[in-house]
Amino acid sequence: MHSSKKSWVWTVMLVITVICCAFVLILHTRNWVGNDGKNLSLRSGFYNVEIPLNELDSVVFVEIIPPMERLHGFSALEKEKGVFREFKDSLTDKKVRIFIDNINQNKIKLVYKDSTYVYFNLKDSVETVQLFQQLNAKMSVLSKPN
């Protein structure tokens, strides 16, 4: 009778573990973009970045991302998420945040604080283009002199 209680506890632990893993997988399935007018926030599971729009230096559409070394994150199917380091800047230890939902589509490259890079796109290419246009419009408004 004592051993059946132990197996019941382990079964509950296993079910909780599977549910937690499924929850984390669901959180990483897409990028969550928030734009409140002052900040752009990108979230995907454990990875998030908050970018003040007034600190944006450039917004560029790129076809491919440069070769990088993954510090932590993952690549699965068409997704690539995590923190990377470019090969050419391995001495400076600059970290690049990647939030890519579809590696085959164009990506938005954000540069802010003079040298911090973020590459991202959304699963739907039309939404990515619309977000790119919104960010370009915000940059032109913010960069106009008073």
Image (cartoon, rainbow, N blue to C red):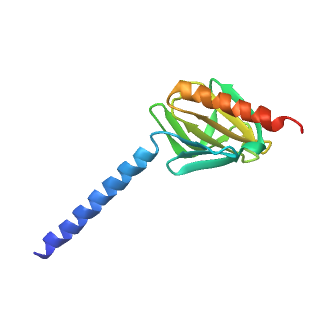
Asked where in the image residue 10 lies, by quadrant, the reply is bottom left
Asked where in the image residue 19 lies, by quadrant, the reply is bottom left
Measuring from the top left, give residue 89's x and y in whole percent.
74, 40
At a point 61% along the width and 26% down the height, the residue shown is 129
**Quadrant holding the N terminus:** bottom left
At a point 66% along the width and 25% down the height, the residue shown is 62
At a point 27% along the width and 57% down the height, the residue shown is 15
Measuring from the top left, give residue 53's x and y in whole percent.
73, 43
**Quadrant holding the C terminus:** top right
* Residue 101 shown left or right of residue 135 in the figure: left
Residue at the right extreme?
146
Measuring from the top left, give residue 136's x and y in whole percent.
72, 30
Residue at the front extreme?
146
Question: Which sits in the foreground, 55 or 36?
Answer: 36
Residue at the bottom extreme?
2
Measuring from the top left, give residue 66's x and y in whole percent.
66, 30
Asked where in the image residue 9 lies, by quadrant, the reply is bottom left
Question: Which sits in the foreground, 54 or 120?
Answer: 54
Question: Which sits in the foreground, 63 or 121?
Answer: 121
136 above or below 72?
A: above
Residue 134 visible in the displayed image: yes
35 above or below 2?
A: above
